[in-house]
Every structure is written in C-alpha cells, then in structure tokens.
C-alpha cells in the first residue's frame, strides 16, 4: 500500500486523533460553579429556608439546591453555558435571572428577595 492511498490517509488521521486527543465538547474545558447568598431585600438578612434552581445550559432537566442556615447556595459541576437561575422562599416573590456559567470559574450571584 502506498502512502498516497486514501485509506492510509484516513488511518493516519485517526491514529493521530487518538494520540493527540479529540475535542470532547464543553465539558472538556472544565465544570462551572454558581454560588451566592439569598437575602431579604429590605432587612438584608439571610433567608434560611428556600430553594435555588438552575435550568438550561448543558443540563438535562434542572438542579435544585436548598439554602443553608446562612442563606448560601452552591451549585457545582455545571457544564459551561447560559442558565436560568430561580430562587424561591415562602412569603417572597420568585426571583429569576439568566446567568452565564463559564468554564473552570465560580460565578457569584447574590440574590435579594422581596416579600409578597
């Protein structure tokens, strides 16, 4: 078989791709993290009982996290992308914002909830 044969070229390309690596999409760049604190808009005190949900981006479905006693949330292992971030707590208006989660970065999104 001569080096100019098309099959040789394809085999050589595939071998190089295996050795050097082939891009695997957004996750190859590294996971993103969203974090922040949810507070009462008037008093600025942390809201301890509530939920933060992310949808879209590279997720299948959604991911929901409960707030801790300091009103903080952290959502790790997100594929980089654009997400809808939703915060909810009893007695408060629902907060919704579009956020960009970037590869290998932690993005802080602090949230103020208004009473109903």
Image (cartoon, helix red, strand yellow):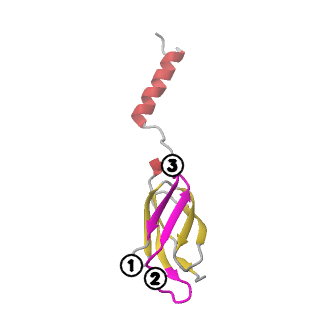
Secondary structure at numbered mark 3? helix
Position of residue 52 measured from the top left corner of the image (x, y, whole percent): 50, 68
Residue carrying label 3:
26
Q: Horizontal and vertical percent for residue 107?
A: 49, 67
Residue 4, position as x, y percentages in the image = 52, 15
- Indicate whether residue 111 is drawn in magenta: no
Q: Is residue 11 above or below residue 97?
A: above
Kind of element beneath mark 2: loop
> Can residue 64 be seen in the rendering of this structure?
yes
Front: mark 2 or 3:
2
The mark that comes first in sequence, 3 or 1, is 3
Residue 87 percent coordinates (x, y): 53, 71
Disc 3 packing (10 Å; few <14; some 14–19; many ≥20)? some
Q: Residue at x 51, y 49 (%)?
A: 26
Density class for disc 2 (Cα within 10 Å; few <14, some 14-19, many ≥20) is many
Quick one: which residue is furthest to the top in this view?
1
Determine the CA span between mark 3 and mark 1: 33 Å
Asked if residue 12 is positioned above or below residue 73 in the image, the reply reads: above
Quadrant of the image for the C terminus? bottom right
Callout 1 touching callout 2 (CB < 8 Å): yes
Label 1 – label 2 distance at C-alpha = 8 Å
Residue, disc 2: 46
Q: Residue at x 56, y 67 (%)?
A: 86
Q: Secondary structure at mark 1?
A: loop
Segment colored magenta: 39-66
The residue tagged 1 is: 69
């Amino acid at each position: 078989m001569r080096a100019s044969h098309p099959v040789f070229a394809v085999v050589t390309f595939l071998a190089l791709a295996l050795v050097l690596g082939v891009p695997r999409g957004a996750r190859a760049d590294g996971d993103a993290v969203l974090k922040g604190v949810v507070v009462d808009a008037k008093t600025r005190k942390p809201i301890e009982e509530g939920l933060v949900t992310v949808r879209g981006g590279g997720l299948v479905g959604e991911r929901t996290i409960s707030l801790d006693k300091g009103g903080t949330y952290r959502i790790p292992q997100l594929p980089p992308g654009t997400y809808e971030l939703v915060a909810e707590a009893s007695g408060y208006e629902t907060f919704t914002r579009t956020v960009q989660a970037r590869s290998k970065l932690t993005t802080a999104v602090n949230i103020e909830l208004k009473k109903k």
